């Protein structure tokens, strides 16, 4: 059982030998809401080592997706800084950030976002097509990924011909296409039964171990959250080490199990 959770201490001036792949300082994202503003992310100081595996829990609307979008460079902060491999994003050019996103970051979005008019193999190949990977290399990587996710014969299937769990595995394979350093997964097992969800997590753990890929997984499932080496909680746009017990209590009450 995890106790709460101090606020994450992420000063950048720690041991220079430590290999942090992402560091944020005072990260803030505000959205206008009528006359007011919503602070979706409220001053997050965070850092994560290369090869680390972290999970994030938190109530709906607490800022989990916004946080992934910011550190994944698909959204811009209102204020604060993000360092990726020690490089300060606010000092990088648009094209350099785009290259970083394509080459170093994989996404599994909250809705799967597979393109229905493309086959499973084509969906997986997409990040490599965008990057300009030669066709032969691309095809080999697609087959390798289909094998990693145990769907070696389903490359020619369209998403509609696959189960929810299979589609989610394709989305995970796609996120790995360009051999990213960091994969950000937003509810990768949402809406899956517990066996399929277990299977998907096992693939992710394998990738994390064998390829030293940094994983940040947003999840609502206690089992998944608790088995991570580094469980985190986001609450009201702030991040905490550990699983905030009061949050789980709120959830248990909602589910009628407390
Ligand atoms: N594009 C936007 N415009 C305005 N407000 C937004 C926008 N995106 C998110 N928000 C607001 O920011 C807050 C955080 O949203 P976010 O999507 O990060 O929550 P979440 O923790 O991922 O929730 P869930 O568990 O439901 O996916 C919410 O109050 C949301 O309404
Ligand atoms: Mg979300």
Image (cartoon, rainbow, N blue to C red):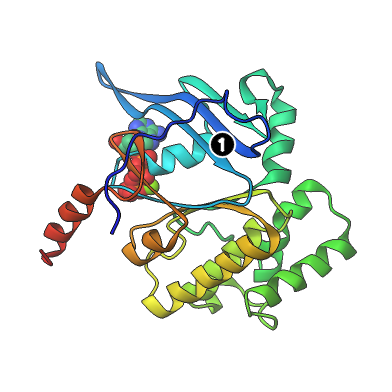
Residue 104 position within the rendered picture, expressed as x and y whole percent measured from the top left: 70, 44
**Who's the residue at 19% across and 48% down the image?**
246
**Who's the residue at 24% across and 16% down the image?**
35
Quarter of the image with the N terminus is bottom left
In the image, residue 3 sits, relative to residue 12, either above or below, namely below
Residue 59 position within the rendered picture, expressed as x and y whole percent measured from the top left: 27, 47
Q: Is residue 221 left or right of residue 230?
A: left
Residue nearer the viewer, 174 or 226: 226
Identify the image quadrant of residue 203.
bottom right
Q: Is residue 221 left or right of residue 97?
A: left
Residue nearer the viewer, 98 or 204: 204
**Who's the residue at 67% across and 40% down the image?**
101
Outermost residue toward the bottom in this view: 153
Residue 136 position within the rendered picture, expressed as x and y whole percent measured from the top left: 89, 65
- Beta carbon at label 1 within 8 Å of ligand 1: no
In the image, residue 91 sits, relative to residue 2, either above or below, namely above
Dot 1 crowding, Cα within 10 Å, few <14, some 14–19, many 20+: few
Q: Is residue 116 visible?
A: no
Outermost residue toward the top in this view: 35
**Who's the residue at 32% across and 26% down the image?**
39
Q: How many dots with numbers?
A: 1
Identify the image quadrant of residue 14.
top right
In the image, residue 95 sits, relative to residue 256, either above or below, namely above
Kindly identify which residue carries mark 1.
74
Q: Please, what secondary structure does the residue beneath circle 1 have? A: loop
Quarter of the image with the C terminus is bottom left
Q: Is residue 221 visible?
A: yes
Residue 174 position within the rendered picture, expressed as x and y whole percent measured from the top left: 65, 60
């Amino acid at each position: 059982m995890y106790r709460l959770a101090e606020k994450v201490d992420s000063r950048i001036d720690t041991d220079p030998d430590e290999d942090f792949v992402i560091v944020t300082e005072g990260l803030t994202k505000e959205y206008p809401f009528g006359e007011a503003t919503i602070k979706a992310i409220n001053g997050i100081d965070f850092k994560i080592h290369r090869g680390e595996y972290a999970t994030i829990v938190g109530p709906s609307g607490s800022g989990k997706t916004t946080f992934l979008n910011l550190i994944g460079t698909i959204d811009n902060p209102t204020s604060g800084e993000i360092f990726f491999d020690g490089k300060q994003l606010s000092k990088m050019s648009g094209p350099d950030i785009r290259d970083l996103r394509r080459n170093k970051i994989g996404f599994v979005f909250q809705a799967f976002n597979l393109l229905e008019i493309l086959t499973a193999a084509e969906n997986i190949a997409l990040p490599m097509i965008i990057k300009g990977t030669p066709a032969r290399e691309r095809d080999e990587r697609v087959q390798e990924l289909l094998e990693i996710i145990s769907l070696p014969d389903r490359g020619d299937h369209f998403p509609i011909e696959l189960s929810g769990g299979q589609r989610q595995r394709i989305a995970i394979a796609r996120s790995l296409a360009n051999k990213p350093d960091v994969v950000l997964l937003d509810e990768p097992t949402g809406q899956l039964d517990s066996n399929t969800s277990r299977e998907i997590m096992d693939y992710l753990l394998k990738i994390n171990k064998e390829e030293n890929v940094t994983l940040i997984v947003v999840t609502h499932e206690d089992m998944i959250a608790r088995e991570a080496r580094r469980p985190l909680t986001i609450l009201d746009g702030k991040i905490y080490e550990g699983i905030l017990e009061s949050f789980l209590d709120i959830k248990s009450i909602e589910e009628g199990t407390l």
